[in-house]
Amino acid sequence: MCAACREIPSMDMPRWTEWAACKNPAYDPDWWWPEKAEPDERATIAVAVCRTCKVRDLCLDYAIQHREVHGIWGALMPAARNALAASRRRRAV
Ligand code: SF4
């Protein structure tokens, strides 16, 4: 299971999660769920992994579309994701 989408019921799991870099068992899924708004060392590692992920754009789009308010998705922390979502909404008008 993808570290970012571990709370999605398995029957609803998007197909792109099969290629998620964060599925590597060498990574602790908790790195994608920082408790603080500012990235700590573990979250920084998670973001670095995301930046290598070939499904990063799909992951980020999923998080924005589903208004995910927690966790790191597509290399973005919630605040950065919210800012991107707001920017996309403004451009869509
Ligand atoms: S972008 Fe990050 S959180 Fe999303 S699937 Fe890839 S490694 Fe996991």
Image: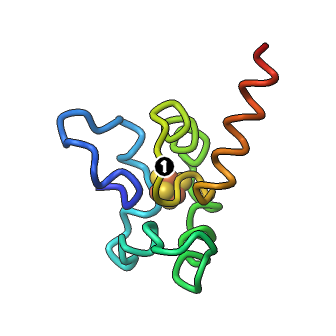
> In the picture shown, does residue 72 fall above or below 66?
below
Q: Quadrant of the C terminus?
A: top right
Task: Identify the residue at horizontal 72%, vertical 25% (top origin).
Answer: 89
| Nearer the observer, 9 or 93 | 93
For disc 1, the marked residue is 69
Q: Residues within 10 Å of mark 1 (few under 14, many from 20)?
A: some
Drawn side of residue 48 relative to residue 7, left or right = right
Where residue 37 sits in the image (x, y, percent)? Answer: 58, 69
Where residue 60 sits in the image (x, y, percent)? Answer: 57, 43
Task: Identify the residue at horizontal 44%, vertical 75% (top origin).
Answer: 31
Determine which quarter of the picture holds residue 78: bottom right
Task: Identify the residue at horizontal 46%, vertical 74% (top origin).
Answer: 35
Helix, strand, or loop for circle 1?
loop
Which color scheme is applied?
A: rainbow
Q: Quadrant of the N terminus?
A: bottom left
**Amino acid beneath label 1:** Val
> In the picture shown, does residue 34 fall above or below 5?
below
Where residue 41 sits in the image (x, y, percent)? Answer: 58, 86
> In the picture shown, does residue 55 fall above or below 78?
above
Determine which quarter of the picture holds residue 43: bottom right
Where residue 73 sits in the image (x, y, percent)? Answer: 53, 53
| Nearer the observer, 25 or 38 | 38
> In the picture shown, does residue 44 fall above or below 9?
below
